[in-house]
Amino acid sequence: MSIVVEQLARRFNRGGSPAVSRVSFQAPEGAITSLLGPSGAGKSTLLRLIAGLEIPDEGRVLIDGVDSTQMPVQQRGVGVVFQSYALFKHLTVRQNVAFGLEVRRVPKAEREARVEEMLRMVQLEHLGGRYPGQLSGGQRQRVAFARALAIRPRVLLLDEPFGALDTRVREELREWLHALHERTRLTTLLVTHDQQEALEISQHVVVLSEGCVAQAGSPADIYDRPASPFVASFIGGASVLRGHVQAGRAAMGALSVTAPAAAREGEPVHAFVRPHDIKLAKAFAGAASASTTTGRVERLKPVGGYVKVFLRLPSGDEVTVEVPRSEFDALGVAEGDSVRADVRSATVFVGDYSI
Amino acid sequence: MHPSTLVLRRSARSLSGPAFVRWGLIGAAVLLLGVFLIVPLVAVFTFAFQKGWEAYVSALTHPTALAAMRLTLLAAAIAVPFNLVFGLAASWLIARFQFRGRSLLMTLIDLPFSVSPVIAGLIFVLLFGRQGWLGPWLLDHDVRVIFAVPGIVLATVFVTFPFVAREVLPVMEAQGSDEEEAALTLGASGWRTFLVVTLPKVKWGVLYGVILCNARAMGEFGAVSVVSGHVRGVTTTLPLHAEILYNEYDLAGAFAVASLLTLLALVTLVVKKFVEWRSQPS
């Protein structure tokens, strides 16, 4: 039951920029595919187009190989979970889960059995008689999952399902969803702006930017081989260093890293460096190489298990480095100190662009 | 006592002015309330019963009074369901869809509120009256609208037009359409979604609108007076009947009918209060 989207476009305001412009991608069968992107990237619109809650201006949606573009939402057989839960407040949990089955005229005995099965699956069998208003956010969202899954949907569409929950519950539910998917193997499309979430539970990630696909691939592809400066800066909180191609290397002041083979001498380069790809050492400790530079510690910010170090390089660029707590204590630096920074890896893009 | 209550009390005292200001304002409010509401209320019932219970009952059971009651009920029985359906449809349309003329529709719904009821009545006279646009055609087909029951119903529908829509629209707009979309994805038809999801969400707003609509439908005077022609026992509603009796110096009779309308108002207020209380989110 794969989902294939071809050249899908949707524009809300005549003359305005399109919410989704000619997007094509595939959500492989039996996998969780994440639609990842910042707010306004068109992720939710895309999901609603696939669900049938919006009509595309152009393009096609194929669910399980069947063109569903013109199919009414009721017949698409999609299970949708919304960020706002969208439970029927005047119905009990059990009635909520049974809703789709009643609509489909499933016989009473089978319906009741299915509802109990669903409630067991979301571990809420003891709360079937409650109203949504009497449940916590995490419980409500599990009811929404049970309701969507009760109709045995062909695909599951999740629109920021954990967006309204606090961090701890969000992580719990993420684990829960992962385990649920292991069991059901239902083709799932997850809209999220949380890269952690996307990288953690999906097998396929589609990064969206301004209504277009920026990159699609496995989480490892996206993280390790960003295809564009946008993806490189969006994923992993990288810092940007600006420089030029010099003698076949990307040089940013005294610092230089390997440049792409196609780079021509003198071209501008941007190097994206992840916070944990820089190793800090005491100034002038050990031998200096091309990939090392000195930097001034502008600010220190302890964040739980690690410390964020804001470094100002001689070139004027600022980089953020994350140092594990124990390593930081051993290093013993304070704000205003000079340290040596060793850039272990960087993603380099040649050419002029704005991010 | 809970600590937060203590804080509230203290801040309430520090926020209030000196004693003479407080009691002066309270006194003025009570006086106004008494003169404008309590005294008239008492007066209505006093005048109604000034010739005794028997006279009161006979004034209300007089054939013309009974005819007026029937006509009032008929007008309300047509106007309320009509405006219920219209109000629901209009607020659903305005709350859920963006379309050309949306704000024009909203303005039109409010029109009966902003037009004087007498003018509203005159509009119908100009449309359906003997000299009106449709007058000759209606005359040819032997249909009487003005100075007849259809005119009274039309005028009542017109003046009560906004009540349901005005009450339901804000409720619908506040609630969004996520639940409706969820119902659609679960396979429910549009009609079923409306009945099972939308209607329960707005039911208290609907009921509130119906109560206000009904009160106005039964109490309307101006517009109905213009189109009625005051044919006793035929085209008089309760408010018109009270006026006729009053003009004939039958004070006891007039106030007996007035007391009936007053009771209707009191019942409406109680029901309205009850609906407000029930519709509070628990």
Image (cartoon, coloured by chain):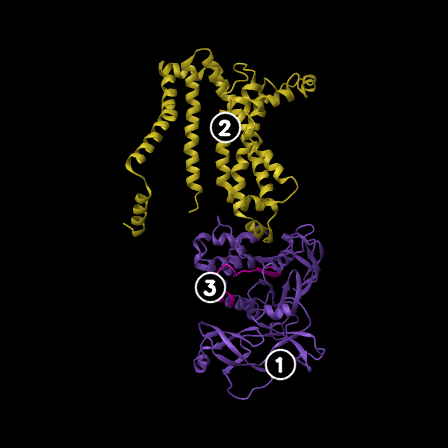
Chain colours: A purple, B yellow
Sooner in the amino-acid sequence: mark 3 or mark 1: 3
Looking at the picture, does residue A181 appear above or below residue B47?
Answer: below
Give the amino acid type for the residue marked by disc 3 in the picture: Val
Q: Are marks 2 and 1 on the same chain?
A: no
Instruction: Give the secondary structure at mark 3.
Output: helix
Residue A168 in magenta stretch: yes
Instruction: Give the secondary structure at mark 1.
Output: strand
Q: Measure the alpha-carbon separation of dots 2 and 3.
A: 52 Å
Residue drawn at point x = 29 percent, y = 52 percent: B3
Residue A157 in magenta stretch: yes
- Tell me if residue A131 can be seen: no
Chain where mark 1 sits: A
Frontmost residue, A151 versus A319: A319
Chain where mark 3 sits: A
User: Tag 2: Cα neighbours inside 10 Å, few (<14), some, or many (≥20)?
Assistant: some
Looking at the picture, does residue A191 appear above or below residue B194?
Answer: below
Q: Measure the alpha-carbon separation of dots 2 and 1.
A: 82 Å
Where residue A98 appears, as percent x and y from the top left, is 53, 53
Which residue is under mark 1? A256
Which residue is under mark 3? A169
Give the amino acid type for the residue marked by disc 2 in the picture: Arg
Give the amino acid type for the residue marked by disc 1 in the picture: Ser
The magenta segment is A153-174
Q: Mark number for residue B216?
A: 2
